[in-house]
Image (cartoon, helix red, strand yellow):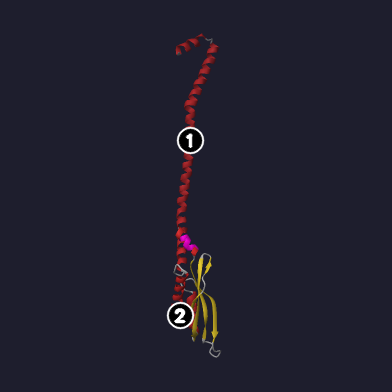
Amino acid sequence: MILRLWSFIKKLRFSQRKILWVLIGIAIFLFIYFLGVLPLIETAKKVEEEIILKKKVVLKYKEFLQNRKVIEEELDRALKQYGGIQQRLLFGETPQLGAANLQEIVKRLSEKNGIGIRSFRILEPKEIDGLRKISLHIEFNPVNNMLSLGQFINDIEHHEKELLISEMDLLIINPRMPNNIQGSLVISGLMKGDQIKEKRREG
Protein backbone atom coordinates (compact mmCIF):
# COMPACT_ATOMS: atom_id res chain seq x y z
CA MET A 1 0.00 0.00 0.00
CA ILE A 2 2.91 2.32 0.85
CA LEU A 3 4.47 1.59 -2.60
CA ARG A 4 1.22 2.44 -4.36
CA LEU A 5 1.00 5.69 -2.36
CA TRP A 6 4.60 6.52 -3.28
CA SER A 7 4.01 5.83 -7.00
CA PHE A 8 0.88 7.94 -6.84
CA ILE A 9 2.84 10.82 -5.31
CA LYS A 10 5.53 10.53 -8.04
CA LYS A 11 2.94 10.91 -10.75
CA LEU A 12 1.77 14.22 -9.24
CA ARG A 13 3.25 17.55 -10.24
CA PHE A 14 5.57 19.35 -7.83
CA SER A 15 2.91 21.82 -6.57
CA GLN A 16 0.38 19.05 -6.11
CA ARG A 17 3.02 16.94 -4.41
CA LYS A 18 3.86 19.80 -2.05
CA ILE A 19 0.19 20.26 -1.06
CA LEU A 20 -0.17 16.54 -0.49
CA TRP A 21 2.89 16.43 1.78
CA VAL A 22 1.46 19.34 3.75
CA LEU A 23 -1.85 17.52 4.14
CA ILE A 24 -0.06 14.34 5.19
CA GLY A 25 2.00 16.35 7.70
CA ILE A 26 -1.16 17.94 9.14
CA ALA A 27 -2.83 14.52 9.39
CA ILE A 28 0.20 13.07 11.20
CA PHE A 29 0.32 16.06 13.55
CA LEU A 30 -3.39 15.74 14.36
CA PHE A 31 -2.97 11.99 14.88
CA ILE A 32 -0.06 12.49 17.30
CA TYR A 33 -1.86 15.39 19.05
CA PHE A 34 -5.13 13.55 19.71
CA LEU A 35 -3.55 10.20 20.58
CA GLY A 36 -0.44 11.37 22.39
CA VAL A 37 -0.37 15.03 23.42
CA LEU A 38 -4.04 15.55 24.39
CA PRO A 39 -4.18 12.60 26.83
CA LEU A 40 -0.95 13.88 28.41
CA ILE A 41 -2.49 17.34 28.84
CA GLU A 42 -5.64 15.85 30.42
CA THR A 43 -3.51 13.69 32.73
CA ALA A 44 -1.41 16.71 33.72
CA LYS A 45 -4.59 18.69 34.54
CA LYS A 46 -5.91 15.86 36.71
CA VAL A 47 -2.57 15.57 38.52
CA GLU A 48 -2.53 19.33 39.09
CA GLU A 49 -6.09 19.25 40.49
CA GLU A 50 -5.15 16.37 42.82
CA ILE A 51 -2.08 18.29 44.01
CA ILE A 52 -4.21 21.40 44.73
CA LEU A 53 -6.75 19.24 46.61
CA LYS A 54 -4.02 17.54 48.65
CA LYS A 55 -2.50 20.93 49.48
CA LYS A 56 -5.89 22.11 50.79
CA VAL A 57 -6.19 18.95 52.91
CA VAL A 58 -2.68 19.47 54.31
CA LEU A 59 -3.44 23.13 55.13
CA LYS A 60 -6.67 22.13 56.89
CA TYR A 61 -4.81 19.48 58.87
CA LYS A 62 -2.11 22.00 59.86
CA GLU A 63 -4.83 24.45 60.92
CA PHE A 64 -6.48 21.70 62.99
CA LEU A 65 -3.15 20.87 64.68
CA GLN A 66 -2.58 24.55 65.48
CA ASN A 67 -6.07 24.93 66.96
CA ARG A 68 -6.07 21.55 68.70
CA LYS A 69 -4.27 22.82 71.79
CA VAL A 70 -6.69 25.76 72.12
CA ILE A 71 -9.70 23.44 71.69
CA GLU A 72 -8.32 20.98 74.26
CA GLU A 73 -7.70 23.80 76.76
CA GLU A 74 -11.22 25.16 76.29
CA LEU A 75 -12.69 21.67 76.68
CA ASP A 76 -10.63 21.05 79.82
CA ARG A 77 -11.74 24.41 81.27
CA ALA A 78 -15.40 23.66 80.48
CA LEU A 79 -15.13 20.23 82.13
CA LYS A 80 -13.57 21.78 85.24
CA GLN A 81 -16.30 24.41 85.40
CA TYR A 82 -18.95 21.71 85.01
CA GLY A 83 -17.28 19.64 87.73
CA GLY A 84 -17.14 22.71 90.00
CA ILE A 85 -20.85 23.37 89.46
CA GLN A 86 -21.67 19.73 90.19
CA GLN A 87 -19.75 19.92 93.48
CA ARG A 88 -21.91 22.87 94.60
CA LEU A 89 -25.18 21.01 94.04
CA LEU A 90 -27.00 18.99 96.66
CA PHE A 91 -26.54 15.23 96.52
CA GLY A 92 -29.38 12.94 95.49
CA GLU A 93 -31.36 11.87 92.45
CA THR A 94 -34.79 12.80 93.86
CA PRO A 95 -36.19 15.88 95.69
CA GLN A 96 -36.54 13.79 98.85
CA LEU A 97 -32.85 12.83 98.84
CA GLY A 98 -31.83 16.42 98.03
CA ALA A 99 -33.96 17.72 100.91
CA ALA A 100 -32.44 15.11 103.25
CA ASN A 101 -28.95 16.30 102.24
CA LEU A 102 -29.94 19.94 102.85
CA GLN A 103 -31.48 19.07 106.23
CA GLU A 104 -28.30 17.26 107.29
CA ILE A 105 -26.17 20.29 106.34
CA VAL A 106 -28.41 22.72 108.27
CA LYS A 107 -28.50 20.40 111.28
CA ARG A 108 -24.70 20.14 111.32
CA LEU A 109 -24.26 23.94 111.07
CA SER A 110 -26.86 24.60 113.78
CA GLU A 111 -25.13 22.21 116.19
CA LYS A 112 -21.78 23.84 115.41
CA ASN A 113 -23.15 27.31 116.36
CA GLY A 114 -25.34 26.22 119.25
CA ILE A 115 -28.66 26.95 117.52
CA GLY A 116 -31.51 24.69 118.61
CA ILE A 117 -33.81 23.76 115.70
CA ARG A 118 -37.41 23.28 116.79
CA SER A 119 -38.83 22.04 113.49
CA PHE A 120 -37.95 21.24 109.88
CA ARG A 121 -40.45 21.47 107.01
CA ILE A 122 -39.66 20.62 103.40
CA LEU A 123 -41.25 23.01 100.89
CA GLU A 124 -42.38 22.24 97.35
CA PRO A 125 -39.37 21.99 94.98
CA LYS A 126 -39.18 24.36 91.99
CA GLU A 127 -37.52 23.99 88.59
CA ILE A 128 -35.12 26.84 87.73
CA ASP A 129 -33.18 26.85 84.42
CA GLY A 130 -32.77 23.09 84.33
CA LEU A 131 -31.96 22.88 88.06
CA ARG A 132 -34.21 22.04 90.97
CA LYS A 133 -34.51 24.40 93.93
CA ILE A 134 -34.97 22.59 97.24
CA SER A 135 -36.18 24.71 100.15
CA LEU A 136 -36.34 23.97 103.86
CA HIS A 137 -38.35 25.96 106.39
CA ILE A 138 -36.85 25.83 109.88
CA GLU A 139 -37.94 27.28 113.21
CA PHE A 140 -35.28 27.74 115.85
CA ASN A 141 -35.47 28.09 119.62
CA PRO A 142 -34.77 31.42 121.33
CA VAL A 143 -31.14 32.46 120.94
CA ASN A 144 -29.36 34.52 123.58
CA ASN A 145 -26.24 35.14 121.55
CA MET A 146 -26.58 37.26 118.40
CA LEU A 147 -23.05 36.33 117.36
CA SER A 148 -24.00 32.64 117.24
CA LEU A 149 -27.05 33.38 115.08
CA GLY A 150 -24.98 35.66 112.81
CA GLN A 151 -22.31 32.99 112.43
CA PHE A 152 -24.96 30.36 111.69
CA ILE A 153 -26.39 32.54 108.88
CA ASN A 154 -22.90 33.30 107.56
CA ASP A 155 -21.98 29.58 107.49
CA ILE A 156 -25.09 28.84 105.46
CA GLU A 157 -24.46 31.59 102.90
CA HIS A 158 -20.76 30.69 102.50
CA HIS A 159 -21.15 26.93 102.49
CA GLU A 160 -19.39 24.84 99.83
CA LYS A 161 -22.83 23.95 98.51
CA GLU A 162 -24.85 26.63 96.70
CA LEU A 163 -27.09 27.62 99.64
CA LEU A 164 -29.03 30.79 100.30
CA ILE A 165 -31.50 32.16 102.81
CA SER A 166 -34.54 33.19 100.80
CA GLU A 167 -36.73 34.18 103.76
CA MET A 168 -35.98 35.33 107.31
CA ASP A 169 -38.48 36.04 110.09
CA LEU A 170 -36.95 37.08 113.42
CA LEU A 171 -38.87 37.90 116.59
CA ILE A 172 -37.64 39.63 119.76
CA ILE A 173 -39.55 37.94 122.56
CA ASN A 174 -38.84 40.54 125.25
CA PRO A 175 -38.03 44.16 124.28
CA ARG A 176 -36.00 44.42 127.48
CA MET A 177 -33.82 41.56 126.23
CA PRO A 178 -33.13 42.43 122.55
CA ASN A 179 -30.54 39.69 122.26
CA ASN A 180 -33.13 37.02 123.01
CA ILE A 181 -34.37 36.18 119.48
CA GLN A 182 -36.34 33.37 117.96
CA GLY A 183 -37.77 32.97 114.51
CA SER A 184 -37.66 31.02 111.26
CA LEU A 185 -35.60 30.79 108.11
CA VAL A 186 -36.20 29.41 104.64
CA ILE A 187 -32.94 27.88 103.43
CA SER A 188 -32.64 26.83 99.78
CA GLY A 189 -30.17 24.77 97.79
CA LEU A 190 -29.89 23.56 94.22
CA MET A 191 -29.75 20.05 92.79
CA LYS A 192 -29.77 18.49 89.34
CA GLY A 193 -33.09 18.88 87.54
CA ASP A 194 -34.86 16.38 85.28
CA GLN A 195 -33.53 18.01 82.06
CA ILE A 196 -29.89 17.58 83.12
CA LYS A 197 -30.49 13.95 84.11
CA GLU A 198 -32.18 13.20 80.77
CA LYS A 199 -29.28 14.75 78.82
CA ARG A 200 -26.82 12.76 80.90
CA ARG A 201 -28.66 9.51 80.13
CA GLU A 202 -28.78 10.36 76.39
CA GLY A 203 -25.06 11.15 76.42
Question: Is 167 colored magenta in this rendering?
Answer: no
| Vertical placement of residue 65 versus 22, above or below | below
Say which of marks 1 and 2 sits in front. Answer: 2
Query: In the image shown, does 48 or 118 lie closer to the viewer?
Result: 118
Residue 82 percent across, percent down from the top left:
47, 63
Residue at image position (48%, 24%) is: 32
Quarter of the image with the C terminus is bottom left
> What numbered label is drawn on residue 46?
1
What is the span of residues highlighted in magenta in the rendered image? 195-200
The quarter of the displayed image where residue 2 is located: top left
Question: Is 197 colored magenta in this rendering?
Answer: yes
Query: In the image shown, does 202 or 55 lie closer to the viewer?
Result: 202
Instruction: Quickly name the residue at label 2.
Output: 110
Q: Main secondary structure of the magenta part?
A: helix
Residue 87 percent across, percent down from the top left:
45, 68
Query: In the image shown, does 145 or 115 lie closer to the viewer?
Result: 115
The quarter of the displayed image where residue 167 is located: bottom right
Task: Say what amino acid the circle numbered 2 marks.
Answer: Ser
